[in-house]
């Protein structure tokens, strides 16, 4: 059946996001377990709690719209999660693994940022102000998580994964 309205398109987007968040609830504990950096592990564990909250917000929006968001599989997230699994199965030095885990996590965050931004715009266009506010709240959290991952990579993980003397000329200062 063809979609005939922006609202129908929004609902499909929300179903996709709901599936994505639920897939992440299953993947994040595995990523946390694989991380060797205590800061990275703690970040994954913190984001797991946020992700559960994201799914709950989506359920509230679904209730507001009078629709269930269950029953759709987000194939994009399925691919990103699979890519993360492959990273964890590679034979890597622990510090290199942490850098790869951050890269995998940021791919997920960027997908979510794009999706939540789109859904928020559509909700605003449709005059669904409460839904738009909830989507914006999640969007802000996804952006903050991406920034934390970038900061952790820059300030610690990437440097530790770089052999002494390599990289952009900075010395490995044993951090």
Image (spheres, rainbow, N blue to C red):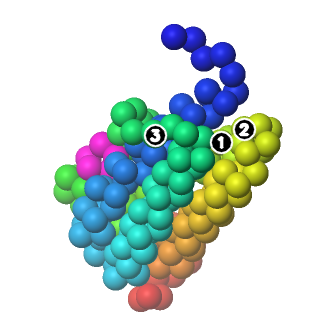
Q: Choose between 10 and 34: the one closer to the eye.
A: 10
Q: Nearer the viewer, mark 3 or mark 1?
A: 3
What segment is highlighted magenta in the picture? 81-86
Q: Choose between 151 and 12: the one closer to the eye.
A: 12
Q: Nearer the viewer, mark 2 or mark 3?
A: 3
- Image vertical order of residue 123 relative to residue 4, above or below: below
Disc marking residue 122: 2
What's the residue at 34%, 82% (across, down)? 38
Residue 30: image location, x then y, percent = 25, 62
Disc marking residue 69: 3
Q: CA distance from mark 2 to mark 1?
A: 5 Å
What's the residue at 61%, 27% (across, down)? 8
- Tag 2 near tag 1, CB within 8 Å: yes
- Image vertical order of residue 160 relative to residue 93, above or below: below
Who comes first in sequence, dot 3 or dot 1? Answer: 3
Q: Choose between 41 and 112: the one closer to the eye.
A: 112
Can I make out residue 129 in this image?
yes
What's the residue at 62%, 34% (across, down)? 10
Density class for disc 2 (Cα within 10 Å; few <14, some 14-19, many ≥20) is many
Which quarter of the rendered picture does the C terminus lie within? Answer: bottom left
């Amino acid at each position: 059946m063809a979609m005939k309205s922006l609202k129908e398109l929004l609902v499909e987007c929300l179903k996709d996001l709901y599936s994505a968040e639920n897939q992440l609830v299953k993947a994040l504990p595995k990523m946390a377990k694989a991380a060797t950096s205590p800061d990275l592990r703690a970040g994954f564990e913190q984001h797991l709690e946020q992700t559960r909250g994201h799914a709950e917000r989506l359920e509230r929006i679904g209730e507001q719209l009078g629709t269930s968001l269950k029953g759709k599989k987000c194939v994009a997230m399925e691919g990103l999660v699979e890519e993360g699994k492959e990273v964890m199965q590679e034979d890597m030095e622990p510090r290199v693994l942490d850098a790869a885990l951050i890269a995998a996590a940021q791919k997920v965050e960027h997908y979510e940022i794009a999706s939540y931004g789109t859904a928020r715009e559509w909700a605003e266009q449709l005059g669904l102000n409460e839904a738009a506010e909830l989507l914006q709240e999640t969007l802000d959290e996804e952006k903050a998580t991406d920034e934390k991952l970038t900061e952790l990579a820059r300030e610690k993980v990437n440097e530790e994964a770089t052999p002494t003397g390599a990289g952009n000329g900075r010395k490995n200062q044993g951090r």
